[in-house]
Image (cartoon, helix red, strand yellow):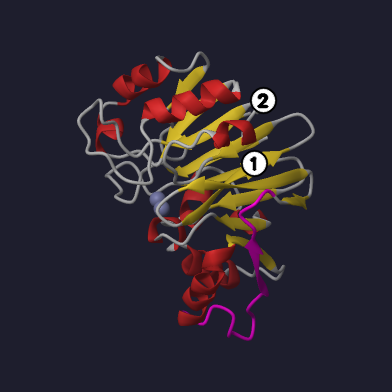
Amino acid sequence: MKMGFLGTAWAVSTSSRDNTSLFLTTEKTAVLIDCSGNVWGKLLKMGFDPLKLESIFITHGHVDHVYGLPSLLEMMRLSGRKNPMKIHVGKDFRDRIERLLDLFEIEKHADSFRVDLLPLEYEETAITIGDLSIGTFPVKHTVKNLALKFATENKSVVYSSDTAFFEPLADFAKGCDVLVHEATMSTALGDNYREGHSTPSDAARIAERAGVKRLFLVHVGYSVAKQPEKAIEEAKKHFRGEVFIPHDLDVYEI
Ligand SMILES: [Zn+2]
Ligand SMILES: [Zn+2]
């Protein structure tokens, strides 16, 4: 399985970090998780054909996780996509996404492909796409939100999406290879506390309890982006595995 980071910033992007969104590819499928910025262009830069995306997952309806969607779908139509697109979206935000696509009349063209908006339950549910099985788990944000688990026969990744420190997430991520966890602020490095978000220490404590091998910090705010080495040091006080703060467009083999 390959994991690519299209963006790694929190709600405010920087000159080198766009809002957080990622993609996963396996031998049989490719999925996008959250959708901000110029996803099409970034996938091309990463050497991946955007028309091969099979499904999109939207964790919640905050603007930094959704605003790239109409444009991505439009670029797919203009580039000749015919296959229907399945968009799995946290149940509470299905209508918001529908309105967002309606606003730009994404499905109203003669050559529009079908878009299926499929609500994701917050309690643990299971979906299969190709060789990927996907699970959901409710996390603790300012709005209803969910973590996602993507697993093939022998590899597994959990993405926390936006969340405060939430211990039950460690059980959901138990024994996975990779935890991708948000780290919006570092109070140790001087950021103000933000409700519904985590620090590198919070993320590391979840990674340690889950026993994952690698922790990737994303959705990073000012201090974590400015002093990544210090944020990694902070996380390593609580987690014995490897800690990464990926750059935008980085691709990792899992
Ligand atoms: Zn966010
Ligand atoms: Zn959010």
Q: Which residue occupies 43% across, 36% down? A: 165
Q: Amino acid at mark 2?
A: Gly
Q: Can residue 112 be found in the magenta stretch?
A: yes
Q: Nearer the viewer, residue 164 or 108?
A: 164
**Which secondary structure lies at badge 1?**
strand
- Residue 235: image x %, image y %? 40, 21
**Which secondary structure lies at badge 2?**
loop
The residue wearing badge 2 is: 175
Q: Nearer the viewer, residue 251 or 185?
A: 185
Mark positioned earlier in the residue sequence (1 or 2): 1
- Residue 248: image x %, image y %? 42, 39
From where the camera sits, is residue 115 visible? yes
Q: Amino acid at mark 1?
A: Lys
Q: Is 237 left, or right, of 15 in this rendering?
A: right
Q: Residue furthest left?
A: 190
Characterize the magenta stretch by its predominant secondary structure. Answer: loop
Mark 2 neighbour class, 10 Å CA radius: few under 14, some 14 to 19, many 20 or more: some
From where the camera sits, is residue 251 visible? no
Residue 253 numbered mark, or none:
none
Q: Can residue 28 be found in the magenta stretch?
A: no
- Residue 239: image x %, image y %? 48, 17
Give the CA separation, mark 1 to mark 2. Answer: 12 Å
Q: Residue 184 falls in which quadrant of the image?
A: top left
The residue wearing badge 1 is: 149
Please state the extent of the stretch shown in magenta in the rendering.
104-124
Q: Which residue occupies 59% across, 25% down? A: 210
